[in-house]
Image (cartoon, grey):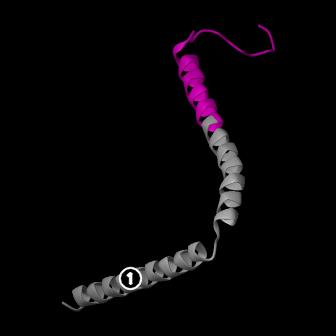
């Protein structure tokens, strides 16, 4: 029975840590949002939008390149099995 009690205490401790972290994050977020006026908020949004667009484009390019790599790889394995790419001749 002691093992179960230790697990229960560990779970309580984990929940308490998560709760404290969430409260701290809410306090920080509330303080940050209260300290910004409309002008600085608009400046932040304008600046952040450019970086977000760049990041999303990079992610999309990576996903598309990965998709083509998978398709090319699968077509290579289903293609002509007798073909040789050895450049030594023969």
Q: Residue furthest front?
A: 38
Quadrant (top left/top right/bottom left/bottom right) for the N terminus: bottom left
Picture quadrant of residue 34: bottom right
Question: Residue at 62% across / 43% down in the picture?
Answer: 56
Please name the residue shown 57% across and 79% down the image: 31
Name which residue lies at 51% across and 15% down: 78
Find residue 53 and report its horizontal and vertical position in percent.
66, 44
**69 to 86, vertically: above or below:** below
The region drawn magenta spans 61-90
Q: Residue at x 31, y 86 (%)?
A: 12
User: Within 10 Å of the Cα at label 1, are there few (<14), some (14-19), or many (20+) other Cα atoms?
Assistant: few
Q: Which residue is mark 1?
A: 14
User: Left or right of 78: which side holds 9?
Assistant: left
Location of residue 58 in the rendering, given as x and y in whole percent from the top left corner:
67, 41
Question: Along the line of sight, which residue is nearer the eye, 88 or 55?
Answer: 55
Where is the C terminus found, in terms of image quarters?
A: top right
Q: Is residue 11 above or below residue 68?
A: below
Residue 69 vertical placement versus 13 (above, below): above
- Judged left or right of residue 1, residue 39 is right
Q: Position of residue 50 (x, y in %)?
A: 71, 47
User: Most extreme residue toward the right, as rendered?
Assistant: 88
């Amino acid at each position: 029975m002691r093992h179960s009690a230790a697990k229960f205490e560990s779970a309580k401790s984990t929940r308490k840590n998560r709760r404290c972290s969430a409260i701290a994050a809410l306090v920080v977020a509330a303080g940050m949002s209260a300290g910004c006026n409309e002008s600085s908020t608009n400046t932040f949004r304008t600046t952040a939008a450019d970086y977000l667009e760049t990041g999303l484009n990079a992610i999309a390019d990576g996903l598309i390149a990965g998709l083509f790599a998978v398709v090319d790889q699968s077509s290579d394995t289903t293609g002509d099995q007798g073909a040789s790419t050895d450049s030594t001749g023969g």
